[in-house]
Image (cartoon, rainbow, N blue to C red):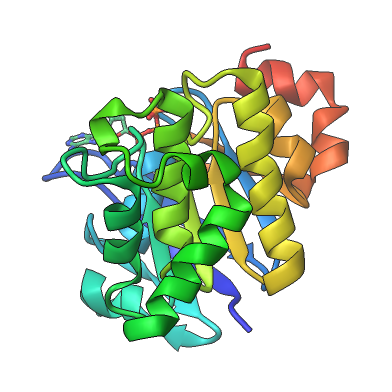
């Protein structure tokens, strides 16, 4: 079980106005929730705050009812949270295989680590072909696959992703989002997916949540949200 519950979360930078203001959200076990909103709506701030990278001014973050709010980032990761930040972050000096072993380092030892890495090659076939290639030689799509695989190989319960489809070709986007959907169904992975690619995100999500001015202004089944032109126009700009 890995339900993420966000209660009255208020987050801001310095003494500025809050970016998130009493935000309430639940991401259910094994569900995929698309986190939508215009530029600057606070999606990145929410993801970073869930990991403890930006402190909460007030409110709580719970994982299966356990309060994480006062825990360090390291402890939150140990409890099952993982973040794939915006920008395809991999260690570009290391090979694909080395990046994956690094991702598995804290979770698996010896042969179990190789098994976990091998599972990533099954999920992302292009990475298997390029296992000995250095990170800096990868295409944008391959690099994003590696960033996602490096998070998955640590077997998180809750995966937070910040704009994974940014700048990628539609085919690669479909493949990446498809893996998230499959992992949620097959392993019970809970996914919170921040995206500007509204159509892509809603196509794999169970629910769509729209952030505006620091609050959740819509929280609806994904198909319903995708079919609501008034809402799309008001908050998502198309
Ligand atoms: P985008 O899609 O453009 O990344 P977003 O929805 O992820 O947008 P955030 O990056 O969370 O939004 O930004 C929300 C607000 O917080 C913006 O007004 C932004 O200027 C502000 N902000 C973000 N990071 C910082 C920071 N380190 N210091 C001060 N203000 C910040």
Measured as percent of width and height from the top left, residue 47 is found at 40, 51
Q: Quadrant of the N terminus?
A: bottom right
Q: Is residue 136 above or below residue 77?
A: above
Name the foreground residue: 178 vs 54.
178
Name the foreground residue: 6 vs 217.
6
Left or right of 85 on screen, residue 188: right
How many badges with numbers are in the image? 0
- Where is ligand 1, by quadrant? top left
Q: Residue at x 66, y 37 (%)?
A: 175
Q: Residue at x 54, y 54 (%)?
A: 121
Measured as percent of width and height from the top left, residue 169 is found at 58, 18
Left or right of 145 on screen, residue 46: left
Q: Residue at x 35, y 36 (%)?
A: 88
Quarter of image, res 82: bottom left
Measured as percent of width and height from the top left, residue 165 is found at 53, 29
Q: Residue at x 71, y 44 (%)?
A: 178
Q: Is residue 177 above or below residue 122?
A: above
**Residue 152 can be seen, yes or no:** yes
């Amino acid at each position: 079980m890995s339900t993420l519950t966000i209660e009255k979360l208020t987050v801001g930078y310095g003494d500025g106005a809050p970016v998130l203001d009493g935000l309430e959200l639940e991401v259910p076990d094994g569900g995929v929730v698309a986190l939508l909103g215009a530029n600057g709506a606070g999606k990145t701030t929410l993801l970073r705050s869930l990991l403890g990278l930006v402190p909460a001014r007030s409110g709580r973050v719970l994982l299966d009812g356990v309060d994480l709010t006062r825990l360090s980032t390291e402890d939150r990761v140990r409890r099952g949270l993982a973040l794939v930040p915006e920008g395809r972050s991999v260690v570009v000096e290391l090979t694909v295989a080395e990046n994956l072993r690094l991702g598995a380092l804290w979770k698996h030892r010896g042969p179990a680590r190789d098994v976990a890495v091998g599972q990533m090659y099954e999920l992302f076939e292009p990475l298997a072909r390029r296992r000995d290639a250095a990170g800096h030689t990868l295409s944008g799509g391959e690099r994003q696959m590696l960033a996602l695989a490096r998070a998955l190989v640590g077997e998180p319960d809750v995966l937070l992703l910040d704009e994974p489809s940014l700048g990628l070709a539609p085919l690669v986007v479909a493949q990446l989002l498809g893996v998230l959907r499959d992992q949620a169904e097959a392993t019970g992975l809970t996914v919170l997916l921040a995206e500007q690619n509204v159509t892509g995100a809603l196509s794999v999500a169970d629910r769509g949540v729209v952030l505006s001015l620091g609050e959740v202004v819509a929280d609806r089944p994904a198909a319903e949200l995708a079919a609501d032109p008034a809402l799309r126009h008001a908050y998502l700009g198309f």
